Structure formats: structure tokens, C-alpha cells
Image (tube, helix red, strand yellow):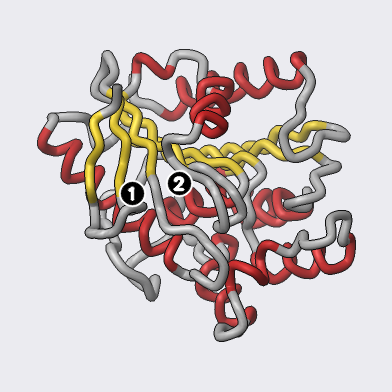
Amino acid sequence: MPIEISYGSLEKQKIDFYEGKSDKILIWVHGGGWLFGDKSSERWIRRFHNHFLDHENRNIYMIGYRTGEATAPNAVDDVMCAYKKILEDANYRNFSKDDIVVAGASAGGHLALMVGFASDSFNGKCISIIKPKSVINIFGITEIKKTSEFLDKTKFFKASNYVREWIGPDLRISEVTKNLSPIYLINENSPNVLTVHGTSDRWVPYDQALLLDEKLGDKHKLLTIEDGGHYGFSEDEDNLIRQTIASFLIENYKK
């Protein structure tokens, strides 16, 4: 059973901690379009285990955060504050703060990238001086407005524009895009990133990965799954994703 750590006074502002066999840290952020999901839900724990082969060797922190319609930017603020709390806990437990990897899928990928890219100039809460060594972004949103436009254009599902639902009627999408899109926060100090994305993803367009690839250059590794969707990968594709993530972790953790 995990140890639950609070980083705020609200129900969702908690972290599940699983102690590993080393001093290295792996942080996992669940998805759900910023509208749904929970750190302790079987779906997201199963997906984490599916992606990471030797997670027992690392100290795992699974972040919970506020979700729901018209709640932006709560998810971003929460994850940033959760990361700061994790740094405090890591210091208490004598873990290596040089060996932190933040990973997430879908909206969790977006939030993991925000932790990696937000700098002192970011207009948000809980900025931390110590940044993660690298980020694993599994089909995360990198540019908010372009994702919203894609969803409006495709409309494969009746109520498919989760971006607009998250932002709500009181915030301007242009401002949210400028402030909360990872692509606009990249600088020379940004960490290395591994992105996994399918070319037929109907929830987060593959172009989101290409934007990141162009902006990050040599700091970006892109694993493209041809005709891959938003999960639903074949066993061979899942194996490729697992092995690519395992290799990336070996390369990015200190020896």
C-alpha cells in the first residue's frame, strides 16, 4: 500500500508514494483531459505498470490533482505544488534530486511537460529551482489552442472538445494557450524529453508531438506509432514503447 502525502487542504491535493530500491525518483501524472481521473484509479495505475518495466527499483510518486469543467488552471497549479512537495519529501528521505523523471499520459503528459518547462518567469504557483532531469510525455497536449481547433474540426465524438470544457466560459483560450502551453515555455535549460505518440490519435493530434520535436531539437526523442491511437496499442507496439522508455531512463538517470 502506498503512503499518502498531502500538499494542500483539498481532497484531490494528495500524492501516493511507493518506496523503491534505489534513490531515484519517478513521478507519474494521470490523464483524463483535465476533467476526470484519479491517482489511485485502477486504469491509471495499470497503465503506469504497463509502461514502466522495472518501476520497483525507483521511488514512485503518483500525483493527484483537481479536475473538472471550468477548473483551469487548477490542474497545472496543483501539479506544480505537488512537485515542490515531492522535492521536500525526497530531501527528507535522502533521495537523489539529480535523478528525477516526470512522466504522464494525455493531459498528464501536458502536466509533466509543464513541470519540466516552467521557469521563474512562469506566472503560476509553486515554482521550484530544482527541475526534473527529463520528461516522458505520452501523447500529451503541447499547444492548447491547436488541440482545441483539431477537436472542433474532427468532432468524432459528440462532446469531444475537452479543452473548452476545462477552460470554461470565463477564461479566454488565447490567454490560457499562451500561459499553459508547454511549447511556449521551452528555453535553453529545458530537460530532455521522450514523446510517444500515434499518428491516428483522435484525442490529441500527432502534430502536437511534431511541434515539440521541432522546438526541442536534439533534446527530444520522438517514438512515432504508425496508425496508433490514444492507447489501444498492439502487444508489439506496447513492447516497443516499454523498451524505448526503459532505454530512455537508463540514458537519463545518473549511473
Residue matched to label 2: 191
Q: Distance between the residues labelled 2 and 1?
A: 8 Å
> Residue 93, percent across and down?
13, 30
> Decide: marks 2, 1 in contact (CB < 8 A)?
yes
Q: Is residue 127 left or right of residue 106?
A: left
Q: In this view, does 241 lie to the left or right of 108?
A: right
Q: Is residue 102 above or below residue 54?
A: below
Q: In this view, does 156 lie above or below 48?
A: below
Instruction: Tell me the amino acid under the disc marked 2.
Output: Pro
Q: Which of 209 and 47 is in front in this view?
A: 47
> Residue 109, percent across and down?
56, 47
Earlier along the polypeptide chain: callout 2 or callout 1?
A: 1
Q: Nearer the viewer, residue 102 or 46?
A: 46
Q: In this view, does 39 lie to the left or right of 168?
A: left
Mark 1 Cα-neighbour bin, 10 Å: few <14, some 14–19, many ≥20: many
Instruction: Tell me the amino acid under the disc marked 1.
Output: Lys
> Residue 4, percent across and down?
25, 37
Residue at 83 percent of width and 68 percent of height: 152
Q: Nearer the viewer, residue 204 or 43?
A: 43
- Quadrant the N terminus occupies: top left
Residue matched to label 1: 131
Mark 2 Cα-neighbour bin, 10 Å: few <14, some 14–19, many ≥20: many
Q: Can residue 192 be seen in this view?
A: no
Residue 199 lies in quadrant: top right
Residue at 75 percent of width and 15 percent of height: 235
Residue at 59 percent of width and 62 percent of height: 183
> Residue 156, percent across and down?
88, 55
**Identity of the residue furthest to the left in this view:** 92
Residue 79 lies in quadrant: bottom left
- Quadrant the C terminus occupies: top left
Instruction: Provide the secondary structure element on which disc 2 rests.
Output: loop
Residue at 29 percent of width and 18 percent of height: 20
